[in-house]
Image (spheres, rainbow, N blue to C red):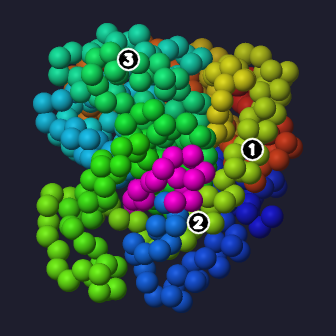
Amino acid sequence: MGERGSMIQAGLPVIELAAPMLGEPEKQALAEVIDGRWLTMGDRVRRFEQAFAGLHEVEDAVAVNSGTAALQLSLAACDIGPGMEVLVPSMSFVATASVVVHVGATPVFVDVEGVDRPHMSIDDARRHITDRTRAIMIMHYGGYEMDVAAWRALADGHDLLLFEDAAHVAGLVGPGAVSDAAAFSFFTNKNMTTAEGGMVVMRDAERRQRARLLRTHGMTANTLDRTRGRAVGYDVVECGHNFRMDELRGALGLVQVERLAGWNKARRELVAHYRAELGRGAPEIVVPFDPAHRTSGHIMPVLLPEGCNRAKVMAEMRAEGVQTSVHFPAIHQFEYYRRSCGETSLPNTERFSDRQLTLPLHPALDTSDVERVVAALCRAVGVAV
Ligand SMILES: *Cc1c(COP(=O)(O)O)cnc(C)c1O
């Protein structure tokens, strides 16, 4: 396949946690950009936006240079700012909360539904709504789709905006359909990659236009317009950012978006195989979410038995050539957030975060890799309990 890593551990190829799917089409696409000598914000970025929007059955999309920029731009284009509180899950990557701080608002952490359902809890969210709450940010943990309609109803009932951190669900139709904005990431370990990159999907055309403006310094005309003689000067009508995507990434994105559906299907098949193997060989390991829950197959999270030494499990598995990780350390327990948001207690998030382990999952794996991972996990847990 030419897309597998070639590290060797204990005489066997290392099973990587995640792996970008890159090959000849990506090399060719990059070479064409280099030969064309137009390097940023050109036709490829625009075509990538349209292809991405098409795949997700939304009207249009705005490409940016990271998933974090996509999140921040979503908030900024909807006027989230100082004095406002935004409900966020603590069970997420830190960017879900840091972008709220960056726009001058305050993140308020919400617990998850339970250890076997690490989605932000709608009941706990309701308890955290105050007269300063202005928005809710949900995150489709691990690729498992959240019930966006239920969140929309909660948001509407309190006159709040609804945002989606869609970093884990590229390729799923749904994000951006009923929320105010959905932000995707194309970081190296996501379901499709542009190395670094992100995309904002917004229903409202005016806000989308505002996002385009804020993406590039609040300037009324871009370099391409000026070079092509469509504009001479420009004005600055907002204090914006440089969140632009470049043509190299646009070219990668155009190739990757075509292959995404096939990769996600392969991921889901591997998840089903994991569930079957774990159910048979390791019934003490909990796999979160119902097997029928709709997912992009982004990661393969499991819960280790209570009291199990996770560091030891990870070290044992590493010695057998299997990479693992933790998704995620709870954000509210990080030093910065304890200091700036105060001590918060989120019991389900803490329990989940303490026991969670992420197993390798990417489309270049096959069923025998899954069996090797499960066997290594069983041996490691046997040693570590
Ligand atoms: C990866 C990720 C992000 C950030 O995306 P970047 O492209 O790395 O900036 C945000 N939220 C979640 C949940 C993520 O997994």
In the picture, the disc for residue 154 is: 3
* Quadrant in the rendering for residue 301: top right
Q: What secondary structure is marked by label 2?
A: helix
Q: Residue at x 52, y 64 (%)?
A: 48
Query: Which comes sooner in the sequence, label 2 or label 1?
Result: 2
The percent position of residue 275, horizontal first and vertical second, equals 77, 27
Q: Residue at x 49, y 37 (%)?
A: 177
Q: Report the amino acid beneath label 3.
A: Leu
Is residue 154 at all visible to an observer of this figure? yes
Label 2 – label 3 distance at C-alpha: 36 Å
Residue 60 among magenta residues: yes
User: Dot 2 corresponds to which residue?
Assistant: 254
* Ligand 1 has an atom within 8 Å of the beta carbon of the residue at disc 3: no
Residue 196 among magenta residues: no
* Mark 2 or mark 1, whichever is nearer to me: 2
Q: Which residues are magenta?
A: 50-66
Do labels 2 and 1 touch, CB within 8 Å?
no
User: Dot 1 corresponds to which residue?
Assistant: 265
Q: What secondary structure is marked by label 1?
A: helix
Q: Is residue 39 above or below residue 311?
A: below
Q: Report the amino acid beneath label 1.
A: Lys
Q: Is residue 124 above or below residue 137?
A: above
Q: Residues within 10 Å of mark 2 (few under 14, many from 20)?
A: many
* Quadrant in the rendering for residue 38: bottom left
Q: What secondary structure is marked by label 3?
A: helix
* Quadrant in the rendering for residue 104: top left
Left or right of 194 in this view: 238: left
